[in-house]
Image (cartoon, rainbow, N blue to C red):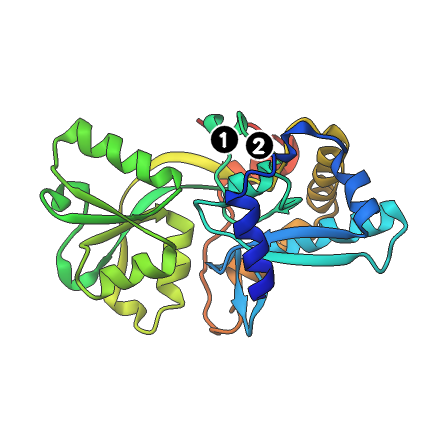
Amino acid sequence: MKNIRRIALLALVGASGSWAAHAQDTLSRIAQNNAITVAYRESSVPFSYLQDGVPIGFSADIASRVVDQVKKQLGKPNLAVNMIPVTSQNRIPLVKNGTVDLECGSTTNNTPRQAEVTFSVNHFYTATRILVKTSSGIKNYEDLKGKTLVATAGTSNVLTMRKYDAQHALGMDLIQAKDHAEALLLVESGRAAAFATDDIILFGIRSTSKNPQELAVVGAALNPEPYGCMIRKDDPAFKALVDGVVIGLMQSGEFEKLYDKWFMQPIAPYGKTLGIPMGKELQQNLKEHSDKPLS
């Protein structure tokens, strides 16, 4: 794992040139290297997170189905699968420069990001809200006036909250954490009054925390946007494969089974249930198969 992290870092900061040159399409490159590189998140419950050092989750299951299809299409049942942990800050650069072939986590599909990467058919819809201590008395964004708010660096939630703060003149001190786990710790330790990120991530964090009753997800839903898997731009063959997998899951009914597994049943290793029924936007996309940003 340490070597993989080091490879990812070198690929991100090195000056060896970007995969933007697109000397090969992704499938040809995978076939030549006899390996596919898949990115995962370490604490994005229930989409992509670690159990005993192994990535699991709703998005992780989708990524696994994509890998199975790549093996089948290339006729390589023993294809090596390299797993690389990514953060909100480095996930897009690592897809762009060719270090990562596929990222399925909790990445918002929005218009600015579509200029840098390509997204698959949307597989979830969410919006920005805030996580607070129940003892704080905070019920909405206006209660954060003059207080410290944390968001995870590299997320769209940072821009959403900056815009909201400016529009409502709340004078919040917006700080950025390296990942969701650090952001939660800042709230739990009292160094931040609230943690802003996608509401489904907050519900996951709350339900799997040591003391869920001490935390609450509050505030109106801001800037609704979908999640999608990321691949490099200008690679229609690989996009067609990834989209085919996601659409196939939706058409076969397997997608709804996966949703029930991760959102309506107790999840490992916590044994707790999120209890979040499928929203109307996602239900609609089971039929439409859109890869467009919601806003």
Q: Residue at image x 75%, y 47%?
A: 252
Looking at the picture, which amino acid does disc 1 mark? Answer: Arg
| Image spot of residue 263 (x, y percent) | 51, 58
Q: Is residue 75 left or right of residue 2?
A: right
Q: Residue at image x 73%, y 28%?
A: 236
| Image spot of residue 207 (x, y percent) | 38, 65
Residue 260 in sight: no
Query: Quick check: 214 above or below 26?
Result: below
Residue 10 in sight: yes
Circles 1 and 2: CB distance less than 8 Å?
yes
The disc placed on residue 113 is: 1
Cα–Cα gap, marks 1 and 2: 6 Å
| Residue 43 or residue 227, whichever sits in front | 43
| Image spot of residue 110 (x, y percent) | 48, 30
- Which quadrant is the N terminus positioned in? bottom right
What residue would you read off at disc 2? 117
